[in-house]
Amino acid sequence: MTFMAYQCVDCRRRLSLSEGDGRCSGCGRIYERRGAVLLAWPTRMHDLSRDEAAHHDHEDADQAEVHQLGRPRNRHYHEALWKKLRALPPGENLLEIGAGSGYDAAELVSGYSVVLSDVSPETLARLERRLGSLAAGYVAADGSRLPFADASFGGVYMVATWHHLPYPGQGLAECARVLRPGGLLVIGLEPNAFYFRPIKLLRRLLCRLTHMDPGEGSHADAEMEGFSYRGLALLFRTGQWQEVEIRPAWLLCGLWHYLAEFLYRACRLPRRLVLPDRLEKFLVKCDEALFRLPGVKHLGWHWNVTARRAVR
Ligand SMILES: C[S@@+](CC[C@H](N)C(=O)[O-])C[C@H]1O[C@@H](n2cnc3c(N)ncnc32)[C@H](O)[C@@H]1O
């Protein structure tokens, strides 16, 4: 824990935690560490976030492998997010919310002072075993109620995580609070409601076809409907943000990704299908060309959003 200034998640008072643990002088709440991980859940945390913590604590499959994060269709969009963040001055304080697999963290810890947070303490413990002191800290926290002081970070990012929060607007307000004026928010790979609303309605059928128990997996993933372009734009219209950019990701790539995942599960294939690199890169290029056509952005499977904390 190098530079961190904390704030109590229960009473919002400034905290002074030596070595990351201690007691809040306002409400008496005790902050403990489990190994390198500071435990900073709010006392009253939404049931969905508790479920998420429990699920991801026990989910030790390599998520980078499961979601094929190293394949060109993923790599292209992650690299675009890294590029945005790398425009910040070296050494800047960054916060990742929902660090999960650590795929993005592993890239950004070189050059930045990155605090990794996730609602699941075990996820962070696994990450700590991989990244050790390369990260500036490991904090088990709910993205809806962060334990950091106002304006602590020059950059905040979360990838495939925002839709796991029970109330996205609350999470966004917390991002605004912990960012410095002019600080950068990068949100990656958020589902488009155009596809995920109907998928939610068909979930029972899809689970049956893919031999999945509807109760297994992340409840947040099961319950979310994704975001429309308009819905996203509205969430950012609070006066706290400027330079908001909402871009689509994955059109043909999304068709391939979800079809391949469906076939893998429905046909119980021994391993996930993989396209040749060149073909996948071609699909990415086609998608980027298609997204330039009017209206096609609404057909992307995911959204990437960047915004700056307004300077007043
Ligand atoms: C789909 S994973 C994405 C992980 C990672 N960003 C990646 O790309 O591999 C979502 C992550 O969000 C975390 N998460 C879920 N609910 C959360 C919450 N309320 N606050 C913070 N993190 C949460 C989960 O534990 C999980 O690690």
Image (cartoon, rainbow, N blue to C red):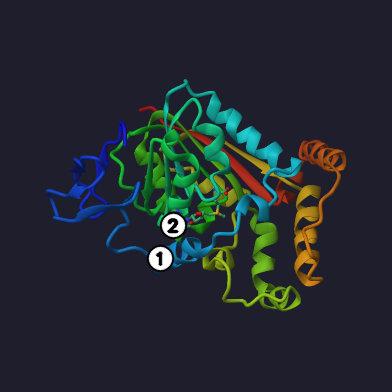
Q: Which residue is mark 1?
A: 50
Picture coordinates of residue 72, whole percent (x, y): 75, 40
Three-letter amino acid code at disc 2? Answer: Glu
Residue at the spot x=72%, y=79% of the render?
A: 208
Q: Is residue 253 left or right of residue 56?
A: right
307 to the left or right of 267: left
Instruction: Please state which amino acid type lies under the numbered disc 1.
Output: Arg
Q: In the rendering, which numbered label is found on residue 126?
A: none
Q: Is residue 253 above or below residue 286?
A: below
Q: Is label 1 or label 2 in front?
A: 2
* Camera-side residue of 74 and 299: 74
For this rendering, which residue is in front, 27 or 175?
A: 27
Mark 1 Cα shell of 10 Å, populated few (<14), some (14-19), many (≥20)? some
Secondary element at tag 1: helix
Of all residues, the one furthest to the top in this rendering is 89
Q: Position of residue 308 (x, y in %)?
A: 47, 32
What residue would you read off at disc 2? 122
Task: Give the CA distance from mark 1 to mark 2.
Answer: 13 Å
Q: The N terminus is located in which quarter?
A: top left
CB of mark 1 within 8 Å of CB of mark 2? no
Q: Is residue 177 above or below residue 272?
A: above
Query: Where on the picture, by quarter, is residue 17?
Result: top left
> What residue is at 44 percent from the left and 45 percent from the top?
128
Q: Residues within 10 Å of mark 2 (few under 14, many from 20)?
A: many
* Residue 120 in view of the camera: no
Residue 200 spot, x, y in % from top left: 64, 69
Please report whichever mark, 1 or 2, sits nearer to the chain's N-terminal start: 1
Secondary structure at badge 2 equals: helix
Residue 14, x across and y down, in percent? 20, 42
